[in-house]
Image (cartoon, coloured by chain):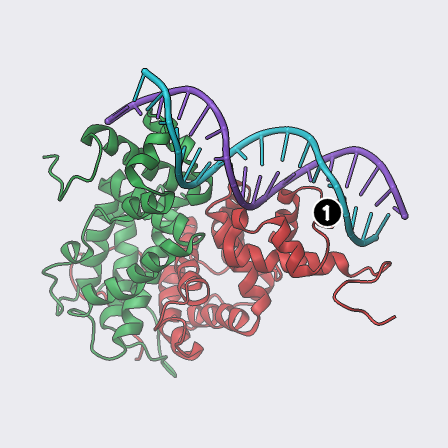
Chain colours: A red, B green, C purple, D cyan
DNA sequence: GTCTATAGACGGATAGAC
DNA sequence: GTCTATCCGTCTATAGAC
């Protein structure tokens, strides 16, 4: 039988389409405004089925929050001694996000719901804190390791927010290479540089020998 | 002391307490979850009075969104040529936030509601984009001025988010001097540095001559 | 000015037919 | 597995008594 708008019985991929629709709406409007009815409508299924499969709306959010990529995979095999370490980190992260709408959506969910829903705030705090700390502790300088990792996170999250979620002009439309070139030395500073304030002398980033 | 530009309706005392309660709740739980009933309860007034004075909930948000400080005032009189320009910007902003719970609350409102409510998203985009661009255009290098300003914004917003809203361990509890010392050179780089990627050579921040 | 009462809409969740 | 019907709670907002 030809399928029309509705899904034939016995199809197994209905659950996936609900999950996809939920992720889109959570990313677009946040948790509260993404109603189960709206999610069902976008997935073209009956509203009752959403809860039938996922239990509660909170459970649905938990399922939608799973990261599509493992941060430690993105940042694997870095050379801690390279003076281009920061550039490499910036390059990998930005290329990952620029290349994948799926990754951007998941990040948007994290930011949008993590600031309005305590259930997801923990996941966001984890990403900024523990997760990145873990993945970067191999390459960060041993002193002030926690501060270094959270500074890197703060810069990258701020960048995601402006470039991908809010889409601020000037940041969202800049070529990825330009952003990498600007942010890379900053991450290098946070990861390996001297974080103490110079009492006198210059305090600028050297980008060329 | 309690001077205000004008006085809409209602007794000044009670209206102010409603506005204060609204700001606290918007900052804590975002727009949707900050119900008028809850705001009224915190202000210890009748729920009906909230709408009686502010019209609609959206109007209440608009009133709560007003910035407590003028960004251009914080950043007035900077020396564009100083090699400590970035440090000075970081210092002023961080001291302003660290010193005033009121400022932190207002920023939290902006972040929490700006990501879930399109009405406030514009204000947030403005802050990251136009406002900061305006206040920093006097001291930023003329080339790539828009990118430079938005990079500064992205770093500072990411910092606010981690330090004041999410309160990520390691970033929220670091002494303000340490954060200023770490972030200052980064802002210097964004404002005045060479944003091009070095093909070869070092790319680190010099913090001492 | 202040509060009671309630309208009117919408949300999550459930029971049960098919 | 899928869908209809609906309960029940909560929300914003309004009307009107005191």
| Image: C8 above or below B67 | above
Residue drawn where x is 38% and y is 69% of the image: A183
Is B54 left, or right, of A161 in this rendering? left
| Image: B1 above or below A17 | above
- Taking depth in this image into account, of A36 and C4 the one nearest to the observer is C4
Which residue has dot 1 on it? A48
- Taking depth in this image into account, of A81 and B153 the one nearest to the observer is B153
Which quadrant does the C terminus of chain B fall into? bottom left
Q: Position of residue A51 (x, y in %)?
A: 71, 45
Q: Position of residue A67 (x, y in %)?
A: 60, 57
- Taking depth in this image into account, of A185 and B49 the one nearest to the observer is B49
- Taking depth in this image into account, of A169 and B206 the one nearest to the observer is A169
Residue B175: tell me if it is visible. Answer: no
Residue drawn where x is 20% and y is 29% of the image: B11
Residue B158 is drawn in which quadrant?
Answer: bottom left
Residue drawn where x is 65% and y is 48% of the image: A60
Tag 1, which secondary structure? helix
| Image: B135 above or below B35 | below
Which quadrant does the N terminus of chain B fall into? top left
Residue B10: tell me if it is visible. Answer: yes
Residue B192 is drawn in which quadrant?
Answer: bottom left
């Amino acid at each position: 039988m030809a399928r029309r708008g509705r899904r034939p019985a016995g199809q197994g991929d209905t659950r996936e389409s609900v999950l996809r629709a939920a992720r889109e709406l959570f990313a677009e409007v946040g948790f509260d405004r993404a109603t189960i009815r709206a999610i069902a409508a976008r997935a073209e299924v009956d509203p009752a089925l959403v809860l039938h499969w996922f239990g509660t709306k909170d459970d649905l959010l938990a399922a939608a929050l799973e990261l599509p990529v493992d941060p430690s995979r993105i940042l694997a095999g870095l050379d801690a001694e390279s003076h281009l370490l920061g550039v490499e980190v910036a390059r990998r992260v930005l290329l990952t996000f620029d290349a994948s709408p799926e990754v951007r959506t998941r990040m948007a969910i994290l930011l949008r719901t993590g600031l309005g829903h305590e259930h997801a705030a923990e996941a966001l705090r984890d990403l900024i804190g523990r997760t990145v700390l873990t993945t970067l502790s191999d390459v960060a300088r041993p002193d002030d390791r926690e501060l270094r990792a959270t500074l890197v996170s703060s810069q990258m999250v701020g960048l995601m927010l402006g470039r991908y979620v809010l889409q601020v002009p000037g940041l969202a439309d800049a070529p990825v290479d330009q952003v990498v070139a600007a942010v890379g030395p900053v991450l290098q500073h946070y990861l390996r540089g001297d974080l103490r304030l110079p009492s006198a002398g210059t305090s600028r980033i050297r980008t060329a020998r």
